[in-house]
Image: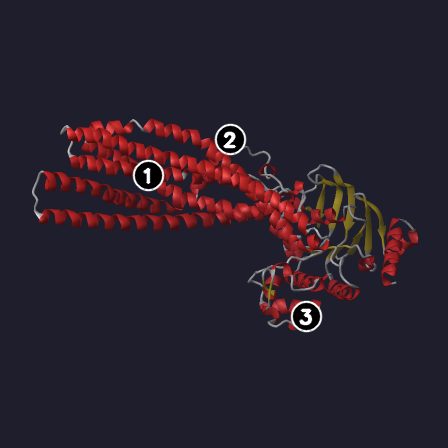
């Protein structure tokens, strides 16, 4: 269940990033850089827009010619009027074709740009340190990867289209109006300052309202994602009503902000509708008087009325896209706040790197006077020193919060030490390229993650370089083959997300098969048998003996029976090593381990009774 404090704000992602004009400008330019490979498409869109607009604007002029030159004062022959009608029809067809082509080209460019952006965003997030995920709710990341990138797609396919087409329409309409009658055109342009005032007045209001709505949506999605992931816990503790109430509270906040955004948008758009109608009335009044006084041709007045209506159409289109533009700026801020985060755990500089070939790794591990803390700066490991020999099987035990998982997280380099060093074969792991380190160190977690896909894909983690035969052999070796054979489609059985159709023990066996096909030199098992029944634990123990053979192995265990036969047991307490030795030695010592063992034995005996 998500606690109130678990829903982090965007500022928690990167506290050093501030929403300023300079940062927004840099972020916006970075987004536009994704359009560079598609610049020829935008050139084609520009020319399509020119032809489409020209075809649109010539139509009222043809009507003006028909009225003034052929109907009122000119030749009444039907042939010339039919020709003008045919030209009008052809212009309408050309306008439709060029409009279709420009929209289609922009869609192609927009979708390609966003596909590249999504890929880079996922790559950037995947390369972040675990501390990034500690302070960022998964639901918010999903919003960034889906909704925010889709908003940017709307910028390229809707806003940019409006800027190109409607912006050029305005300029060309003004040109046609001045061509027809300079004085009447100047009267119409008196309205432009009023349009500018309305646009400036609503700009900040729309951006702020959208920012608040997006923030509430992100929090709503984060809450939903966390609760769906923990639904079994919610139902077990009968918290459904409580969580529905908390969801409703967040949903209501999002609703209120969304309605405020809608109200601001409606007022903004309707202001221009009213202004357009007033402008038409103004032109009819001024132009009608001029026609009555024979200072203006009736066809010119008709064309002016058509152009003034068309004049406000692009303005209305641009203003309707204003909200999308504001949402784009907000989404760009949110995305570039993430892009500006540099992983705390990074590859070493090329001159400092010490790559180790997997075949040459012996597996010696040294923790040299390490100190470590998470974000709250409270040390969880204090000046800890530990040396593990190649091929040694080491058990790590202790109560919750003793620092066991933190220790192995440092070896896997999910985090970096604050002081001291962690070494493999005498080389500081901070000098190892991350891909080399992750090939050397294999990890089996308490609840192995399985993806939506076949068993074969889950074992080889979608790495096509690992053959199907190697996967099957690994599953046979760890004892997973009988379980897989019982499934309807065997190794081709598609698993649901997180492998919910399999038991905890079956998921563990698949994770052990992963280890065999990846062949790491150092193996970490983090509470791998913590929640298994005795029979399943024995199966896992047999598999553990197989996968640990010839490897340096560190096993974190709540069940002390898992590490009874370890070469050495490390007993941790409050971030330090309390005791170490074999099972028998530690029992004879009668210290902290003996106390833990006695409590564990009494708990097991009580459970059996």
Q: Residues within 10 Å of mark 3 (few under 14, many from 20)?
A: some
Residue located beneath label 1 in the image: 314
Residue located beneath label 3 in the image: 483
Question: As rendered, which of 446 and 584 lies closer to the eye?
Answer: 446
Q: Identify the residue shown where x is 73% and y is 49%.
A: 405
**Looking at the picture, how far across and down is residue 601, in whole percent?**
87, 58
Indicate the secondary structure of the residue bearing disc 2: loop
How far apart are the two marked residues, 1 and 3, measured between alpha carbons?
66 Å
Closer to the chain start, of discs 2 and 1, is: 2
Closer to the chain start, of discs 1 and 3, is: 1
On screen, residue 606 versus residue 270, left or right, reads right
Indicate the secondary structure of the residue bearing disc 3: helix
**Looking at the picture, how far across and down is residue 97, in whole percent?**
27, 51
Question: As rendered, which of 388 and 319 lies closer to the eye?
Answer: 319
Q: Residues within 10 Å of mark 1 (few under 14, many from 20)?
A: some
Q: Identify the residue shown where x is 82% and y is 54%.
A: 568
Dot in front, 1 or 3: 1
Q: Identify the residue shown where x is 32% and y is 39%.
A: 313
Task: Evaluate whether residue 85 shows in this view.
Answer: yes
Dot in front, 2 or 1: 1
Residue located beneath label 2 in the image: 20
Label tally: 3
């Amino acid at each position: 269940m998500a606690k109130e404090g678990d829903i982090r704000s965007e500022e928690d992602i990167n506290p050093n990033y501030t929403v300023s004009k300079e940062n927004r400008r840099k972020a916006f330019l970075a987004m536009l850089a994704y359009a560079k490979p598609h610049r020829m498409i935008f050139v084609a869109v520009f020319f399509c827009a020119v032809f489409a607009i020209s075809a649109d604007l010539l139509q009222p002029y043809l009507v003006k010619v028909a009225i003034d030159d052929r109907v009122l004062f000119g030749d009444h022959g039907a042939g010339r009027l039919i020709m003008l009608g045919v030209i009008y029809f052809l212009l309408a067809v050309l306008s439709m074709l060029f409009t279709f082509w420009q929209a289609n080209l922009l869609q192609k460019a927009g979708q390609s740009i966003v596909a590249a952006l999504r890929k880079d965003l996922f790559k950037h997030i995947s390369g972040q340190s675990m501390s990034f995920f500690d302070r960022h709710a998964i639901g918010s990341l999903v919003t960034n990867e889906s909704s925010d990138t889709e908003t940017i797609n709307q910028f390229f396919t809707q806003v940019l289209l409006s800027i190109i087409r409607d912006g050029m329409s305005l300029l060309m309409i003004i040109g046609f109006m001045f061509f027809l009658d300079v004085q009447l055109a100047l009267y119409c342009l008196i309205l432009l300052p009023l349009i500018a005032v309305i646009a400036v007045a609503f700009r900040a209001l729309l951006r702020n309202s959208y920012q608040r709505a997006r923030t509430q949506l992100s929090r709503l999605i984060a809450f939903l994602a966390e609760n769906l992931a923990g639904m079994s816990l919610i139902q077990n503790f009968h918290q459904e009503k409580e969580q529905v109430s908390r969801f409703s509270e967040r949903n209501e906040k999002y609703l209120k902000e969304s309605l405020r955004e809608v109200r601001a948008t409606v007022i903004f758009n309707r202001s221009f509708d009213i202004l357009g109608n007033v402008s038409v009335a103004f032109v009819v009044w001024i132009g009608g008087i001029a026609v009555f006084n024979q200072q203006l041709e009736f066809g010119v007045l008709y064309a002016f009325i058509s152009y003034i209506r068309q004049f406000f159409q692009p303005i209305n289109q641009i203003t309707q896209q204003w909200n999308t533009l504001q949402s784009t700026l907000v989404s760009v801020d949110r995305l570039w706040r993430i892009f500006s985060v540099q992983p705390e755990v990074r590859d070493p500089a090329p001159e400092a790197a010490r790559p180790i070939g997997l075949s040459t790794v012996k597996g010696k591990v040294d923790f040299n006077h390490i100190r470590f803390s998470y974000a709250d700066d409270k040390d969880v490991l204090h000046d800890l020193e530990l040396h593990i020999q190649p091929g040694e099987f080491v058990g790590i035990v202790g109560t919750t919060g003793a620092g066991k998982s933190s220790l192995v997280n440092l070896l896997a380099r999910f985090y970096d030490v604050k002081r001291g060093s962690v070494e493999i074969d005498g080389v500081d792991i901070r000098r190892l390229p991350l891909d080399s380190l992750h090939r050397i160190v294999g990890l089996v977690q308490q609840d192995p993650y399985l993806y939506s896909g076949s068993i074969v894909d889950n074992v080889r983690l979608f790495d096509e370089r690992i053959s199907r035969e190697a996967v099957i052999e690994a599953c046979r070796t760890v004892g997973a083959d009988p379980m897989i054979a019982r499934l309807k489609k065997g190794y081709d059985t598609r698993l649901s997300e997180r492998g919910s159709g399999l038991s905890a023990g079956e998921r563990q066996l698949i994770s052990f098969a992963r280890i065999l096909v990846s062949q790491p030199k150092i193996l970490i098992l983090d509470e791998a048998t913590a929640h298994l029944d005795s029979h399943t634990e024995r199966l896992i123990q047999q598999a553990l003996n197989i996968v640990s053979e010839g490897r340096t192995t560190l096993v974190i265990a709540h069940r002390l029976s898992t590490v009874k036969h370890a070469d050495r047991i490390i007993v941790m307490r409050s971030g330090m090593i309390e005791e170490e030795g074999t099972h028998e030695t530690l029992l004879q010592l009668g210290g902290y381990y003996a106390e833990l063992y006695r409590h564990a034995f009494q708990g097991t005996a009580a459970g059996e009774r």
